[in-house]
Amino acid sequence: MTAATATTVRSSGGTPGAESPVRFDNAAVKAQFPLLATTIDGAPIHYLDSANSSQKPRAVIDAMTRFTETTYAPINRSAYRLAAEATDAYERARTKVAGFVNAACADEIVFTKNATEAMNIVAQAWGRANLVGGDAVVLSHMEHHANIVPWHMLAAERGIELRWIPLTADGRLDLTDLDRLVEGAKVVSVTAMSNVLGTLTPVRELCAAAHDAGALAVVDACQYVPHNATDVQAWGADFAAFSSHKMCGPSGIGALWGRANLLEATPPFLGGGNMIADVRLDGFTPAPAPAKFEAGTPPIIEAVGFGAAVDFMTGLGMDAVRAHEIELTRYALDTLASRFGDDIVIHGPTDLDARGGVLSFAFRDLHPHDVSQVLDQHNVCIRAGHHCAKPLMKLLGVAATARASFYVYNDRDDVDALADALDGASDIFGI
Ligand SMILES: Cc1ncc(COP(=O)(O)O)c(C=O)c1O
């Protein structure tokens, strides 16, 4: 295992151009992930699928276990002390998540099932209340299905127009025609970081362009928040969606951040218990946000885990997280290029300032699923498929890609194992 060296990089979340010294003890971080200490067939696991879902550190596992063993009770409904303590823990988690993305207050965070549900609240609840036939929504060619399908559903119901920001040849947003695309639009909804290309998008610029055009600015922050210091207020966004399971927290919980006035003005998405101020025979009055969007029993234990994940990531320091990923991505790009040359095609920008630690690639003429299966024999876990971005696959002219993605526990050994396993794939297929 190789500990990352001290390095100086540009902070992605801070002032452009500002240099900040960051240190990251890679080996010590990795040691906090119990699953990564296990083996398959006696050999270590090289987990390179964190853009899909991340592994969980001991601190998160313990926080959830401790809460379950000592404090668990239903929240919000009962007057006994245990329930009050559980409710406090749930709300403390909300405060932590709010702080992590610099929301103006905790009530701007709605706990959802995942980022997908968060995007659906925007499209289905805000969209249904505010969009009519002929209105335009601007998306980009690099969106995840979570930021496409909810708008398609609304388009089918309402007849809204979907416009698409194209991409440059190296996988960035092509903003040449942005003014024309956003003109008269009601919503601009774009990812902050592509889960396929790793591309970091100019979120502030997009939000400003949206607002200049009188449109709502929505950010799919699902890949961005786990890897970069995030400031939703500095972005100037209106809504942002992200998931706990991609940032060392449990699955089953995500978040929608929304400006307080917008959440207040948005009707509820799901109806039921917990989301009402009053229910009568002739109707109901919704609770104020965020409870209005949290119908039914919420993911209570998971919220505590989400809060613990925020503490864990904050403890590492998000500038250090970003620095580590730049360092490892640089090493991976260099290693793969020097070992495989033209036999490997990596999609997306090569400029490290413009990308995160997600490498989608084509290897020789092997099918990505074959690559993934052979890599699995070396305990190298990558994702192969369309990555829930079929319009982007079509644009790239492929049905699928192989994708290796890095996180705080990955190190140079993982990259070397990936390269060795690719050599193994060549041997097996005789190429
Ligand atoms: C960019 C992006 N948006 C949205 C999602 C959906 O996240 P979830 O499955 O947690 O709802 C993902 C998941 O991979 C993603 O990468």
Image (cartoon, grey):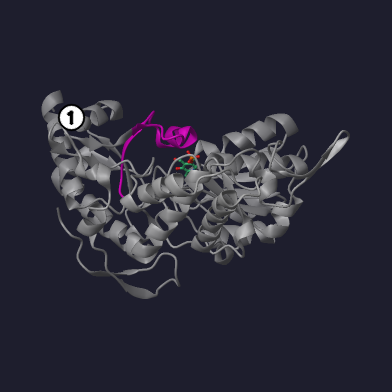
Q: Tell me the residue at 57%/57% (across/down).
A: 206
Q: Which residue lies furthest to the front in this view?
A: 80
Side of 333 relative to 319 (left or right): left
Q: Tell me the residue at 69%/29% (across/down).
A: 156
Examine the structure image and report whether residue 394 is included in the region drawn in magenta. Answer: yes
Stretch of the chain drawn in magenta: 384-406
Q: In this rendering, does residue 200 appear at all?
A: no
Residue 195 at x, y = what percent?
Answer: 42, 44
Side of 95 relative to 390 (left or right): right
Q: Name the residue under label 1.
A: 377
- CB at disc 1 and ligand 1 closer than 8 Å: no
Side of 271 relative to 108 (left or right): right
Q: Where is 2 relative to 35, above or below?
A: below
Residue 107 at x, y = what percent?
Answer: 64, 57
Q: Where is 79 relative to 19, above or below?
A: above
Q: Where is 294 relative to 225, above or below?
A: above
Disc 1 is placed on an element classified as: helix
Q: Residue furthest right?
A: 282
- Looking at the picture, tell me which residue is in the foreground, 280 or 326: 280
Q: Tell me the residue at 49%/49% (across/down).
A: 71
Q: Tell me the residue at 66%/49% (across/down).
A: 79
The answer to which quarter of the image holds residue 109 is bottom right
Give the class, few, some or many, for how many residues have Cα within 10 Å of label 1's Cα (few <14, many ≥20): some
The answer to which quarter of the image holds residue 339 is top left
- Looking at the picture, tell me which residue is in the foreground, 232 or 93: 93
Specify the amino acid type for callout 1. Answer: Gln
Residue 66 at x, y = what percent?
Answer: 40, 49
Side of 116 relative to 152 (left or right): left
Examine the structure image and report whether residue 131 is included in the region drawn in magenta. Answer: no
